[in-house]
């Protein structure tokens, strides 16, 4: 993205290293240097929320079941998450970010984009700012972060992931295209397994392969989403750092006292949840493009089914329409007992934000 003067933006993406696990190792010296898994009970149905680099060496990954993590690494220490501690560390990090600029867009507790084109430190070199941010995080919070510096959000994020932990990767604008060239297409924003296989079918493995195609053939193979990817492959990313996107989603869920077997009763509960979600969206003057239904069956199996709409919505009625459709088409509610139901709204848009910055990402969920 270029500013009106035509100068490239200076974007930093900061991502904490193994965030929850690092906070635990910081606060518990006896955990340091050891494989550590933060998550649910390894003997229950929990999943890994975060794991130390020592645990990753055994193949343990986030979102894996803790039972599997235990099989891979029986000697790992398993602890439950302490969200207050992570929240506190997260606030500490954001405080540092806001000392640099107010153009901060948090993506989660441990990740944010910063636009430092203009900054409160009056430092023209974005690389120097990134080094100083990493140093401040280390000094004040005793935690490490990896940072990526580039002229677009997309590349800054790819860069922060390039060397981890404690990494720093700078992609100057003039090197952007050669950096993108070799990237596997899966690194492009929004490419999931379905898009990847459509791309493989037309012989595209890397962003360089994609760039070599004509816009017409990309559109033919992938539709509108393909045009966005084609732009990314050319180093063009229309997204800007938006400090108002603090909230990434709004949700409400309910665990029932008794497993719900009647679909009618379940629908009534969902209608209320939709109303709650709609009210909070409207209160914050936001609309959502993605609506997600979460169902936990009586045996604790949990599924989420979502839909991404061409137009963002905020009314309870519209949200409920989508939820009802998902419930009927994509779940076994009414056949299997349901223990918990949830509704969430994400891909948020302010009322003043144009829709055309958003593209169809059919496999976003
Ligand atoms: Mg992280």
Image: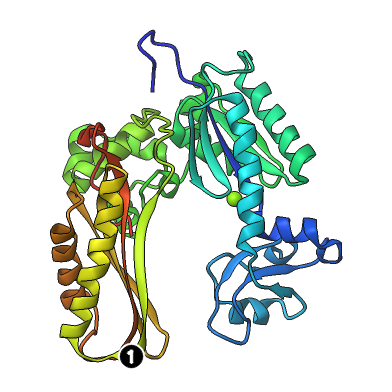
The residue positioned 77% from the left and 60% from the top of the image is 25
Farthest residue to the right: give it. 30
Q: Quadrant of residue 297?
A: bottom left
Asked if 353 appears above or below 143 in the picture, the reply is above
Asked if 363 appears above or below 101 in the picture, the reply is below
Determine crowd level at label 1: few under 14, some 14-19, many 20+ residues with C-alpha closer than 10 A.
Answer: some
Asked if 196 appears above or below 141 in the picture, the reply is below
- Left or right, 106 with reference to 357: right
Image quarter where the C terminus lies is bottom left
Residue 96: % across, % down: 65, 33
The residue positioned 56% from the left and 37% from the top of the image is 159
Q: Quadrant of residue 265?
A: bottom left
Residue 3: % across, % down: 39, 15
Which residue position is annotated with label 1? 259
The residue positioned 51% from the left and 27% from the top of the image is 102
Residue 58 visible within the image: no
Secondary structure of the residue carrying tag 1 is strand
Q: Is label 1 within 8 A of ligand 1 (CB to nearest ligand atom)?
A: no
Q: Nearer the viewer, residue 311 or 191?
A: 311
Image quarter where the N terminus lies is top left
Residue 323: % across, % down: 20, 67
The residue positioned 18% from the left and 45% from the top of the image is 223
Asked if 226 appears above or below 70 in the picture, the reply is above
Q: How many marks?
A: 1
- Left or right, 196 with reference to 130: left
Residue 67: % across, % down: 60, 82
Residue 210 visible within the image: yes
């Amino acid at each position: 993205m270029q500013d009106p003067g035509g100068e490239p933006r200076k974007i930093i993406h900061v991502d904490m290293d193994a965030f929850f696990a690092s906070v635990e190792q910081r606060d518990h010296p006896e955990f340091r240097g050891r494989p550590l898994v933060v998550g649910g009970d390894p003997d229950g149905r929990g999943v890994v929320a975060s794991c130390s680099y020592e645990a990753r060496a055994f193949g343990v990954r986030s979102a894996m079941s803790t039972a599997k993590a235990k099989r891979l690494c029986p000697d790992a220490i398993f602890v439950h998450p302490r969200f207050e501690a992570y929240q506190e560390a997260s606030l500490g990090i954001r405080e540092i970010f806001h000392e640099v600029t107010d153009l901060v867009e948090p993506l989660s507790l441990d990740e944010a984009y910063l636009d430092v084109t203009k900054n409160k430190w009056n430092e023209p070199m974005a690389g120097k700012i990134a080094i100083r941010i990493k140093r401040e995080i280390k000094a004040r919070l005793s935690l490490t972060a990896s940072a990526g510096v580039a002229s677009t959000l997309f590349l800054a994020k790819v860069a922060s992931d390039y060397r981890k932990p404690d990494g720093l990767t700078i992609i100057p604008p003039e090197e952007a295209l050669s950096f993108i060239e070799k990237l596997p297409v899966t690194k492009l924003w929004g490419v999931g397994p379905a898009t990847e296989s459509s791309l493989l079918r037309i012989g595209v493995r890397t962003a360089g392969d994609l760039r070599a195609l004509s816009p017409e053939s990309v559109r033919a193979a992938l539709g509108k989403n393909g045009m966005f990817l084609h732009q990314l492959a050319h180093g063009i990313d229309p997204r800007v750092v938006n400090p108002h996107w603090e909230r990434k989603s709004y949700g409400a869920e309910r665990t029932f006292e008794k497993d719900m077997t009647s679909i009618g009763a379940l629908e009534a509960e969902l209608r209320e949840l939709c109303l709650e979600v709609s009210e909070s969206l409207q209160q914050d003057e936001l609309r959502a493009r993605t609506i997600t239904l979460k169902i936990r069956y009586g045996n604790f199996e949990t599924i989420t089914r979502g839909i991404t709409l061409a137009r963002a919505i905020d009314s309870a009625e519209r949200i409920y329409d989508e939820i009802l459709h998902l419930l009927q088409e994509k779940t076994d509610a009414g056949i299997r007992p349901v223990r918990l139901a949830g509704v969430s709204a994400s891909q948020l848009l302010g009322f003043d934000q144009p829709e055309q910055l958003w593209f169809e990402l059919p496999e976003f969920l």
